[in-house]
Amino acid sequence: MDSNPASSTIITSSTSVSDAQTADALLFGSPKDRLDFYRKEIQYETAILSNRTNAYLSAQSFLVIAFASSMANLNPEWGKLFTLVVPPFLTLLGLISSMHAWPGIRAAYEIIDHWHFKQSQLLHSQPAMGLAYDDSPLFSEHESSEKGYRKSLLFSMRTPWLFSVFWLLLGAFSIYAQTTDMAF
């Protein structure tokens, strides 16, 4: 017999549903407690996603300012070389930043999706749950549908991809502007 205490609590297919429900009842106490837990997890993960998106957008805004400033360099001695080297470097930095931001944003989205799924399963298995939580229904079909919360997360999900395209266009423009000797 294995002496590891965690190995005796692993749920396998031979574990009955009533055993799992008993364990849930011990952990949460009531469906209301479980719903509260799911909602707190959703709020926590949404805050993490918001913080990641804010940090990413702040970094990108500083890179855009640096890019615009470097493109406006008119120094007659070293300005041409500077505007040929620095903007593509900032473009590369913006692209790398976007590639590194994407996994964290995607992970937060998947965790939020998981907790919404668990909440939806709870509400479907306990139809009176919305009414038991307070005296008015908690969820309309629009609020509890998958489309509702996923639409609210689209900004965070699309931002790294939009900035990647933005940086590719800016990088191509900066190289084109310097190699064709465009004057604005």
Image (cartoon, grey):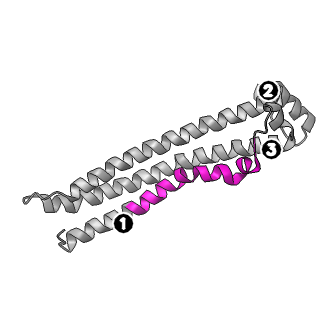
Q: Is residue 72 left or right of residue 118?
A: left
Residue 83: horizontal and vertical position, in percent? 20, 60
Q: Which residues are magenta?
A: 139-166
**In the drawing, what numbered circle is on residue 121?**
3
Q: Which amino acid type is shown beneath numbered disc 1?
A: Leu
- Rendered position, 126 above or below 79: above
Q: Residue at x 48, y 45 (%)?
A: 53
Distance from disc 3 to disc 1, alpha carbons, whole Å, reads 44 Å
Name the secondary structure under disc 1: helix
Q: Which residue is mark 2?
A: 27
Residue 124: horizontal and vertical position, in percent? 84, 45
Nearer-the-camera pick, 21 or 68: 68
Q: Earlier in the sequence, mark 1 or mark 2?
A: 2
Neighbourhood count class around disc 2 (C-alpha, 10 Å): few under 14, some 14–19, many 20 upward:
few
Residue 118, image quadrant: top right
Q: Residue at x 53, y 45 (%)?
A: 104
- Rendered position, 83 above or below 149: below
Nearer-the-camera pick, 156 or 27: 156
Q: Is residue 161 magenta?
A: yes
**In the drawing, what numbered circle is on residue 86?**
none
Q: Earlier in the sequence, mark 3 or mark 2?
A: 2
